[in-house]
């Protein structure tokens, strides 16, 4: 891509245990051979995922994924057709877990960084130069509320807040599965609601400031709530934007929405996770797409 690209799109999606077909011993049920998961089921799932990501609705310049097992998954998605859609670059955060984060992109990152302990849930940072603007994109998958998740999430959110502050003067964007809901969380929320907040977010663009991030999740103008389902609807998937996304120069926030894939939700709108036995479903999370427009 050359020149001043008028629109930049970013898609974030928790793929739900996107395992390859090579069994190494750390896979999670039901994506193991003894439960009927093998090469045929894997190829069918890759094909289904590529078909979805190749639609106009899901098309994005930068795709950030969570719950990816291996680099093989990313390579196979490219070879199954995404490479024909302009995607040339990919990468995985390798930290000995089958549910790590990765990316597929039309733009080549000029820098990549890993922040935090590889023994926990580190944050992936990608730095792009698009239309002459330096853009920092963070991809994360926070721990759930099980087995000490609260403490791990709090530490991750403190780190993310500092990382975004350290990118002052440049556009910083954080996406992923935060495993936390700013409507009810005491650590990831509007700071006016909780004195324990370590990752402050707001849904009003006019309130955004240095260290106070905008998320369309809290903005009723956008359909970004109820992004996943486990026992009931959860709002765990988010995009956070720094103050540079509202300065009227370069890339500014334009739009965000959740996307429901074909065959990916039931009659009640509940996401249907992929089942190897039937081949039905997609993920227990919906994808979140964000659009930024370029201002000269």
Image (cartoon, rainbow, N blue to C red):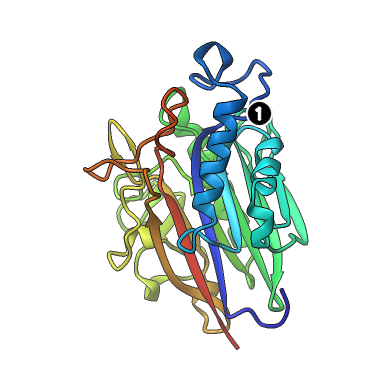
Quarter placement of the N terminus: bottom right
Front residue (pair 152, 89): 89
19 is higher (above) or lower (below) than 60: above
Q: Look at 59% across and 34% down and name the residue there.
A: 43
Eyeballing the image, is 47 above or below 85?
Answer: above
The residue under the point 65% across, 15% down is 25
Please indicate, yes or no, whether residue 175 appears anywhere in the rendered image.
no
Image location (x, y in percent) of residue 244: 55, 73
State the residue in front, 57 or 255. 57
Horizontal placement of 70 versus 201: left or right? Answer: right
Looking at the rendered image, the quarter that the C terminus falls into is: bottom right
Q: Position of residue 23 (x, y in %)?
A: 66, 19
Residue under circle 1?
119
Callout 1 environment at 10 Å: few (<14), some (14 to 19), or many (20+)?
Answer: few
Q: Position of residue 280 (x, y in %)?
A: 40, 33
Which secondary structure, mark 1?
loop
**Toward the viewer: 235 or 40?**
40
């Amino acid at each position: 891509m050359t020149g001043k690209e008028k629109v930049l799109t970013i898609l974030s999606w928790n793929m739900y245990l996107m395992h390859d077909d090579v069994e190494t011993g750390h896979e999670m049920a039901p994506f193991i051979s003894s439960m009927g998961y093998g090469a045929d089921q894997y190829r069918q799932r890759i094909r289904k995922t590529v078909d979805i990501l190749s639609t106009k609705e899901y098309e994005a310049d930068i795709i950030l994924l969570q719950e990816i097992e291996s680099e093989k998954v990313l390579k196979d998605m490219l070879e199954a057709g995404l490479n024909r859609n302009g995607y040339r670059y990919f990468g995985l955060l390798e930290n000995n877990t089958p549910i790590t984060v990765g990316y597929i992109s039309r733009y080549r990152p000029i820098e990549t960084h890993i922040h935090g302990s590889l023994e926990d849930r580190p944050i992936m940072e990608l730095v792009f130069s698009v239309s002459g603007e330096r853009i920092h994109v963070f991809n994360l998958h926070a721990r759930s509320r099980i087995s000490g998740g609260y403490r791990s999430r709090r530490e991750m959110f403190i780190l993310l807040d500092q990382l975004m502050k350290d990118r002052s003067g440049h556009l910083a964007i954080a996406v992923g599965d935060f495993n936390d809901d700013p409507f009810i969380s005491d650590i990831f929320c509007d700071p006016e609601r909780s004195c324990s907040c370590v990752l402050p977010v707001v849904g009003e663009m006019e309130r955004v400031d240095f260290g106070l991030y905008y998320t369309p999740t809290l903005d009723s103008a956008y359909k970004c709530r109820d992004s996943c389902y486990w026992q009931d609807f959860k709002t765990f998937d988010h995009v956070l934007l720094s103050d540079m996304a509202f300065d009227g120069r370069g890339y500014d926030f334009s739009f965000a929405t959740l996307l429901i894939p074909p065959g990916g939700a039931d009659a009640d709108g509940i996401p249907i996770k992929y089942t190897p036995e039937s081949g039905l479903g997609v993920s227990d999370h919906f994808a979140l797409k964000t659009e930024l427009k370029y201002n000269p």
